[in-house]
Image (spheres, coloured by chain):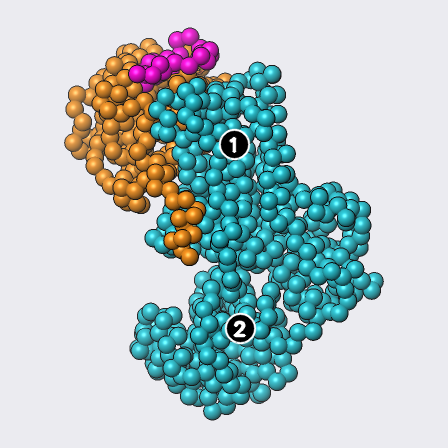
Amino acid sequence: MRELDTNKANTWCSGCGNFGIINAVKKAIHDLNAKEVGTDDIVITAGIGCHGKIFDYLNLSGIYGLHGRALATAQGIKLANPDLKIISFGGDGDSLGEGLEHTLFAAKRNMDITLILHNNGNYGLTTGQFSPLSFQGYKGLSTPFGSIEKPFDAVPLLIEAGATFVARAYSARIDHLCEMIVKAVQHKGFSFVEVLQPCVAYNNTYQLFNQKVKHLEIVPDKLSQALTLARSTEDIYIGIFHQETRAVYHELLYQDANPYRQRKSAAERREHKA
Amino acid sequence: MSENIYTILIGGRAGEGIKKAAQVIAGLLCQAGKQVYQADDYQSLIRGGHNFSTVSSSDETVYAAYQDADLIICFDHRSVEEHAGFLKPGGVLFCNSDESDLEDGAGIPMTSIMKKHYPEGSNIGIVAIAIFCAHHSIHQYIMRNTIKQQFKRNIAENIAFADEIYELVIKKSSEPMDHPFDHQYRFLSGNQAIGLGAYYAGLDFYFAYPMTPASSLLHYLALKKESLGIYAIHAESELAAINMAIGSAVAGCRSAVGSSGGGFALMQEAFSMAGIVEAPLLCVLTSRPGPATGVSTYTAQEDLWFAINQGHGEFPRVVASPDCHERAFSLAAELLSLAWEVQTPAILLTEKQLSEDMRNLHLDQTSLPEASCLMDNCSKDYKRYAITESGISPLQFPQDCPESVVKWNSHEHFETGLRTDAAGAMIAMKDKRNRKNAVLEKATRKYQRVAVYGNGENVIFAYGSTVMELREALKYTDSGFRIVAPIYLEPFPFEELKEYEGKAAIVVEHSSTGQFARFLQWKLKLQTKRNILKYDGRAFDPIKLANLLEEAIHA
Ligand SMILES: Cc1ncc(C[n+]2csc(CCOP(=O)(O)OP(=O)(O)O)c2C)c(N)n1
Ligand code: SF4
C-alpha cells in the first residue's frame, strides 16, 4: 500500500474539520484497497478553498483545478478513462456557488464520480464570507448585518438533481464518514457525500453538531421521507438518504469502451478513413 | 480576367430549406466537374425573415461567392426586391408568381403547385433544384436520383413536384450543361474540414456549448460519432466544456473545444489554467461580429487581439488562422499536434465565413502530423513538472505506471505538482514554462507559417478568410499584387516576414478599428498604406474588392 501522506506542510487551522475528512479519506482508501480498488486507480480533483488543500496532502494523482470546476475536470477524466475511480473534493462555495451548474449536471448525468462536499457553511480561505449553505443571519465580512438569503439544502438539492447515492456525514465521526466514502466510491453512478465540517475560525459548529447529529439507521425507502429527514433541523441526520441504480453516462455514451485505452494512432485513422 | 464564373442565388424565408437546396445544386455542379463555393446568408431566426444562399462555380478554384448572379430563384417577394438588381446581363430570375408579379422575370406559381403535391408538409426547396436542372437541360433522371438521395422524406411527393416544375421550365431552357456528372467530390465547410483535420491528428473528444458559428463543428462531430470515433459532448456551458477538455487530457485523451467570442470569453479562466497546468488543448475560436452577442450569423475579424491575449497571466500559446478550407484541415491537425508537443493550448482562430462557407476540396491526409507527446518511461519518482532544458516535462497518465503519482496543479507549483508560493520555486516554474516559447518558435517552423500568393510589387497583408476573398479579387486586376498571409500569428513568423519589416503595405481586414494593421505595426513595424476595412458582417464581393485595391494603389 502506498504511503498516502505528502511532504507538504499542513496549513489548516488546528481543530479544523478538514482533518477529520482527510483521515477518513485515507482510511477509506485502505478499505477500498482491500476491496480491489487500487490506489493508482483513484484520481482526485479539487476546487479552490481550504478544502482544496487536501489535494496537496494526499499522495494521489489528479488535478488541482479551478474554483468551482473540480467536477467539470473530473467528468473529463472519467470520460477519457472510465476505469478510473474519481473522487472530487469541493467546498460549499465551490460546488454549490461558483460550480453549482457542474454539480447539478454531474448528478443529472449520473456520472460515475464521487463528490465529497466540505460543508463548513462559509468561505474559509477567503476569510469567512457567507456561502450558499450559510444559515440565514450568518455574519461574515460580506454580510456584516447577517445574510438575508435562505440557504440551499444540499442533500435534497442533489437528490432532486439526480444523484443516485446521497449521504451526509460529520467530520468528527470518522468511522462513519469513512464508511460513507467507501460506499460512495463503490456506488456505480453519481455519489454525493455532504460532510458537516466545522470551521473553527469562522463557523465553529462542533457543539451544535455534537448535540444534534443522529445516525440514520436505514436508508429511507420513500423519497419524501428522505427529504423530510434531510431537512430536519431539530435532529441533524447523517447516513445514506438515497440510493438507486440508474444507467451511468459513460456507458450510455459508449458502452464498455475506454477511449484512452482504445485510442487509435493517427496512422490507423488515416488508413481507416482513406 | 476571369469570366467563366457562374453564380446562382436562391432567396426566401428562413425555414424554406434554402441552404439545403443550394447544397444540392452545388453538389450537381461538383459532379459536373466544376469548382464550387457556397455561402449562406441567414439571420438568427428559425422562420421568416430573409435568407439567401449563393453558389459560385467555375473551371478554376473559386474562393468567394459573387453578388452578381446568372440565375436567381426567389421563393418570396422580398428576395426579388433584394436581389433582382444583381442579375447579370443575360441572366434569368425565376420568381414565385403566387407572391410577386414581375415583368421580365419568369413567374412560376411555386406555392400553388407545391400545395397540389403535398397533402401535408411542404418542400419549396425542390423548386430551385428542378429549375436549375431544367434550365440547364440536365437529364430528368439525374434530377430525380439526386432528389431521392438528398431528401429522405416524402420521396414520391418530392419527385412529382420536381417533375411538374421541370416540365414547365424545360420548354424555356437555354443553357444546356453537357457533362458526365460522374466526378467524385468532397463538399465541405471550414468547420467540417477542421473536424476532419483534428480527427486525422488523433482527436478523441470535442467539448462545446452551442454558439454560432462554431455550432456546426459540434453538430458535424456528433453526427460522425460512429465513423470517426470522436465523442462530441454538448456540455452545460463553455466553462464546463473547457474544464472537461482539460480533464480528458489529464487522463490521456486528445481533446478540443470550440466556440465564438462570447463562449471564449467564458472559457478564459480555464484557458489560462491550461497554460499553468500545461494542458495540451486545441481551441477553435470562430468569430462573429461583436462585442457580446453581436451579430450572431455574420462574419468578422474582431477577435485577433482577444485571441492573442486570451486568458490571464503569462504563458506560451499558439494562435493561427487558416487562409482557406484546405488550410483549416491541415492547421487543425498541426495545432492539435503542437499543443501536445509543447503541452500548451493552441487557438485556431477563424471566422463565420470560413467556418460555414462550403467548397469542394481535395484533402490530403497523408502528410498531417500526429498529436503525440513526450512520455516518461515510468520513472518511480515521477514529477509532472520536471524542470527541463526545453521546458517540456515528460508526461504520464493515470494507471500507466502503478508506482507513480501524477499531480497537475492550477496553482503555482513545484516539480512534483504540489502547490507553492515560494519565491524561488515561482521563478523556476515560470522560467520553465517560458522556455517553451523558444520550442514553439522552432516547432512551428515545421509547418508553413506564411502563405504568399502572387509576386507583384503591391503588397497586401491579410489573414484568415480575407485571404480567400483577395485571391478571388485578384482575378479582376492586372496590377501586380502580392498577398502576404501570416497563418501563424503567435509565435509570430518573423523570419519569413522580415523582408517586409518597416515597409508599407495595404492591409485588408474585417474589423472597424484595424486590429490586424495595428498588430502588424507592433510585430513588424509595417506601415499601412491603406487599411481596407469591412465591418458589416458581409464578405467582400470579389469585383468590388478588386476595385478597392486598384483605388488603393492609385491613391
Ligand atoms: C474564480 C474565482 N473566484 C474567486 C476566487 C477566490 N476564492 C478562493 S477560495 C474561495 C471560496 C472558498 O469557499 P469554499 O469553496 O466554501 O471552500 P472553503 O475555503 O470554505 O473550504 C474563493 C471565493 C477564486 N479562487 N477563483
Ligand atoms: S479557515 Fe476554517 S476551513 Fe479553513 S482551515 Fe481554518 S478552520 Fe479550516
| Residue at the spot 45% in from the left edge and 62% down from the top edge | B46
* Chain identity of mark 2: B
Give the letter of the cyan chain. Answer: B
Q: Secondary structure at mark 2?
A: loop
Marker disc for residue B278? 1
Amino acid type of disc 2? Lys
Q: Secondary structure at mark 1?
A: loop
Amino acid type of disc 1? Glu
Q: Which residue is mark 2?
A: B34
Which callout, 2 or 1, points to the residue nearer the camera?
2
Q: Is residue A3 magenta?
A: yes
Q: Which image quadrant is residue A15 in?
A: top left
Is the residue marked by circle 2 packed among few (<14), some (14-19), or many (20+) residues within 10 Å? Answer: many
Is the residue marked by circle 1 packed among few (<14), some (14-19), or many (20+) residues within 10 Å? Answer: many
| Residue at the spot 25% in from the left edge and 14% down from the top edge | A175
Marker disc for residue B453? none
Q: Residue furthest right?
A: B555
Is residue A109 left or right of B207 when viewed as pictured?
left
Give the letter of the orange chain. Answer: A
The quadrant the N terminus of chain A occupies is: top left
Q: Establish if A33 lies above or below B122.
A: above
- Magenta region, mostly helix, strand or loop? loop
Q: Nearer the viewer, residue B409 or B294?
A: B409
Task: Report x, y in % for residue B345.
Answer: 54, 38
Decide: marks 2, 1 in contact (CB < 8 A)? no
Residues in magenta? A1-26
